[in-house]
Amino acid sequence: MPEGLFTIFVDDLPNSMDPKRLFSMFGKFGVVTDVFIPAKRRKGTGTRFGFVRYDCRVAADMAIQKADGLWCERVKKADFQKGKRKMERVVNRAEAWMGRTS
């Protein structure tokens, strides 16, 4: 992950949520640099999830604190160490989708 970018994980998104709406909702906490909602669902629960990226740690922390349980079940700091290989594939797809492959 590039330094200066702070990614949060948003779980249990409603079916009606799209990237534009997610961007708008989380923009209330700071400047959102990008969002990604994979087409894939979580294996165990079948729920949708997404990622929101900020360029400011304070904004990311505020979003985690204020949005957790408000619009969706869980909002937390994205943990790229657990299931690192799977997460890298998801992040790589997200970056490709956003046109930011390295």
Image (cartoon, helix red, strand yellow):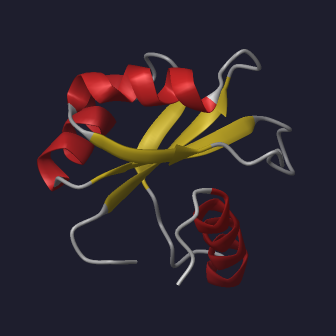
Is any atom of residue 72 visible in this view?
A: no
Q: Work out which residue is located at the far left of the displayed protein and give it.
A: 58
Q: Position of residue 36 (x, y in %)?
A: 59, 47
* Quarter of image, res 101: bottom right
Above or below, comparing residue 33 to residue 93 in the picture: above
57 lies above or below 11: below
- Identity of the residue drawn at 20% across and 36% down: 62
Residue located at (37% from left, 28% from top)? 26
Residue depicted at 13% across the width and 47% down the height? 58
| Quadrant where the N terminus is found in the figure | bottom left
* x, y percent for residue 7: 39, 56
Q: Which x, y percent locates residue 81?
A: 51, 79
Query: Percent position (x, y) of residue 59?
Result: 19, 41
Q: Is residue 3 left or right of residue 77?
A: left
User: For this rendering, which residue is in front, 25 or 72?
Assistant: 25
| In-front residue for pair 67/25 | 25
Q: How many numbered dots are placed on residues in this image?
A: 0
The residue that appears at 58% across and 63% down in the rendered structure is 99
Query: Is 41 left or right of 94, judged from the image as shown?
Result: right
Image side of residue 34 versus residue 59, left or right? right
Quadrant position of residue 87: bottom right
